[in-house]
Image (cartoon, grey):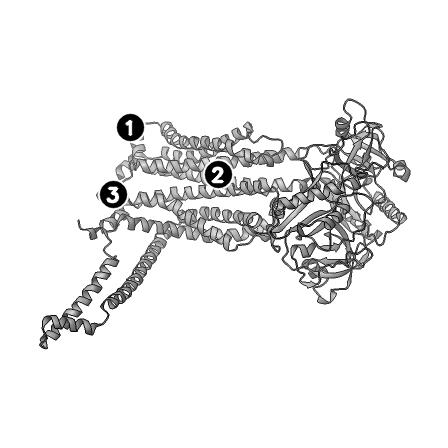
Amino acid sequence: MSPHARKPFWYLRRGSRAVRDEVDEEIRLHLEMRIQALSAEGLPADDARREALRRFGDLEGARQYCRRQDEQKEADMQRGLRFQDLMQDVRISLRALLHVPVLTLTVLVTVGLGIGATTVIFSAIHAALLRPLPYADPDRLVWIYTDAPPFQFRFSVADYLALEAQQTQFEGVAGFTNRTMAYSDGSAAELLTGRQVSWTYFGLLGIEPALGRDFTQVDAQPGSPPAVMVSHGFWQQRLGGRADVIGKPIKLDGADYALAGVLAPTVGPLERRQEFFVVAQFSPPPRRGPFPYWMLGRLRPGVDPSAAASELRGINRRIFPIWRSSYQDEKATWSLRDLKARLVGHAHTTAGLALAAVVLVWLIACANASSLLIARVTSRRRELAVRAALGASRGRVVRHLLVESGVLAAGAAAIGVVLAWFGIGLMQDVGANYFPRTDEITLDGPVLSVLAAVTLVSGLIFGLVPAMHGSGGPVDESLRSAGRSATGSLPVRRLRQVLVGSQFAISTPLLVAAGLLLVSLNELSQVDLGFDGRNMIAGSVRLPAARYQTPGSVTSYWDEFKRRLEALPGVSGVAFADSLPPDRAFNVNNFDLEDFPTPVGQSQPATPWVAVTPEYRRVLGLTLLEGRFLDERDIQLPNLQSVVVDRTWAARFSPGQSALGRRFKEGGCTQCPWTTVVGVVSDVKYAGLDQPDQGTVYSPLSGELSRFFVLRTLGDPLILMPSVRQVARALDPDVPLTGVATIDELVAQSLQRPRSLSRLVAGFALVALVLSAVGIYGVMAYYVQQHTKEISIRLALGGRAADVLRLVVGQGMTVVTAGVVAGLLTAFASTRLMSSLLFGVSAADASTFLAVSLFLMAVALAACVVPARRATGLQPAALLRNE
């Protein structure tokens, strides 16, 4: 056979050597014709050749020029031919796929789902972990904190002033703290979330206001008119988007703040969801505390972070003796870390789990598509054999089949883009509960590049094996055997079984992870709050400081508000506190016991510190275990040192003896009076359902402008919510009432993050399970189809239907069992990585592994029984007559 016989008859190609030979031949012929003409004129042969070469000119240059021209034309022609071939394959593939709509739609939807989900999760990971922070020179930004292992504390005003004055390694430092303020437009008030920042904050981050000006040092001077910057949303929604409001006052907490500027619509993660920024005016403090401020710093160019950290520790050592009377923890020091790493936090674990889940779903979808295409290419063996008999090489057939897979992959990518578009919107809405920087998720260049890469790999994964299988084997054998319905190819069956087994091996870890997260969520929901939360309403009220400046006015408001709430029909009790269960403990205070003082230089113990009114115990239903609860005597100024502790505090700090009468000094203050324990009550969750109890201290609540109210009702608390809002509005319309909810709703809100993560992984696991079930069903249905004649012979010879059922189901369950076992081993090794996301359940929980295994086997059994029952219902006589 000649070398050209293997090439398709419709494909013409010239190599570069052929092009060079043709050019040389043309030049040679041209010279010979010229020599012959000159010889005819009477010149001798040698003279005629020399004259012909002289007249021709630069022979080598002409040869190279002609070669370049011909090679370019040849390349253009070959590109055109390849493009025509490709378009022809695409048209043929489209027509062929339209004749099998069920298979085509199945591949498009399943693979498109995998591509879309993978794109969404990668876009979230890219926004949170890979994309630089949207600040000027973000690599030089650091987060500065007080390091007292295992805790990381904020800075006090004294710390900030010392750092600002003594540091040399930073271009600048800035501090901020969260703050809520009541905004009033004259007719109604609302409580907004914002921040109090140092005047250097926006300059440090490189943020320029869209309107107005930045804060200046003059704004930070004590006594200067208070200034505020607002978000773009605040400006649009509450100020009408007018440019003339710059410099004019807006009312926050009853005081006028001059509007300095408006931020741009797009801001960084530190500014998101913050409605306003008020400038802090620092005065020299009397002590080193409290500690409300987080610190930011920008390293000078070329400064090593370790050098800056060393300077921070040195400044902390220098100021420690100055404030020793109010701060005793000598081992606590200052440290820093990269700002991006601090903002991302522990998102790597969540990101890894989500990415693993979607990649597994994508692989299952590709394996399922590959299994379907193997069945399709098996049924097309006659068609492909005819192509080969007409001269198509194996490479040409493989290319044709890969183009068909590419068409499917492109269609799946189109579906994936649509799903990714909606998925990104969903992630931006609800994903913020468990993933940072969701507002920055977009379908940008890197994300689209990953989508294209995933599409290409998808086409290769589910197209290459069927293409290689469909193009192999002797042509004459394929022509003779195609169309037979008996045995079928053993290698093909085994390949499809391997693909289905791998689907179950992949889906098993997903289902185990989902099961563990669901068990963890159930354990969290069963945590005892420490009180009966039914028939209870809670909410937050904040008094404007400018209007309620005297203790008398503050007390009068709270007394009247309490009286009006108690007067509502169906209310059995009202109390106030500065924290709320299950996860709103806003004050964690350190203390030093009188009889067991903390060693010099050691960190003092710290626990949640909840300020309450005397009615709190009765309204919540706390059990008094020892002594008494706080009463009106403790609210009076001389008696502010009385506190009540819970059972866990007593067991931790007074083991084996009564906690009554124990004394300690709080807040690291050595000159403050002693605080005395006067009672012990039952435990209540304040630091979160998933956090261990550390002990809680209850102190008297008096004089605070901001409070939570807790209201117990005799019936359905939802009925009373409108009345509660009306009471607050009627008493003072400039006082905002926010966060009104039942205790059950507060508990549900605290579970929102683990619930969202559980639903996400469970959704992927469910998709994987469905795809795996479809895969095993397709394999067994194909098995029955290929063995119809064999099964008919068995039944005709007296074989029992039960034996056929056992044969078919046994074939399928053998594959499934192998896949599930492999998946369980993988899950056992991989689920340990998600231990930090679990509560009340081990990553190797045997009951979860067993339940998932049984569930998978049950679903697979159902998928195998359907084609098996079809096999037992065959009519042997009719089938054999048709053979």
User: What distance separates the C-alpha of mark 1 from that of mark 2?
Assistant: 39 Å
Element assignment for label 3: helix
User: What distance separates the C-alpha of mark 3 from that of mark 1?
Assistant: 31 Å
Lateral position of residue 603 relative to residue 520, left or right? right
- Does 511 sit above or below residue 14? above
Residue that label 1 marks: 797
Q: Looking at numbered disc 1 in the image, what kind of residue is underneath it?
A: Leu
Mark positioned earlier in the residue sequence (2 or 3): 3
Q: Which mark is residue 478?
A: 3
Residue that label 2 marks: 769
Q: Callout 2 environment at 10 Å: few (<14), some (14 to 19), or many (20+)?
A: many
Image quarter where the C terminus lies is: top left
Q: Which of 378/407 is in front? A: 407
Q: Which of 740/241 is in front? A: 241
Is residue 236 at all visible to an observer of this figure? yes
Mark positioned earlier in the residue sequence (1 or 2): 2
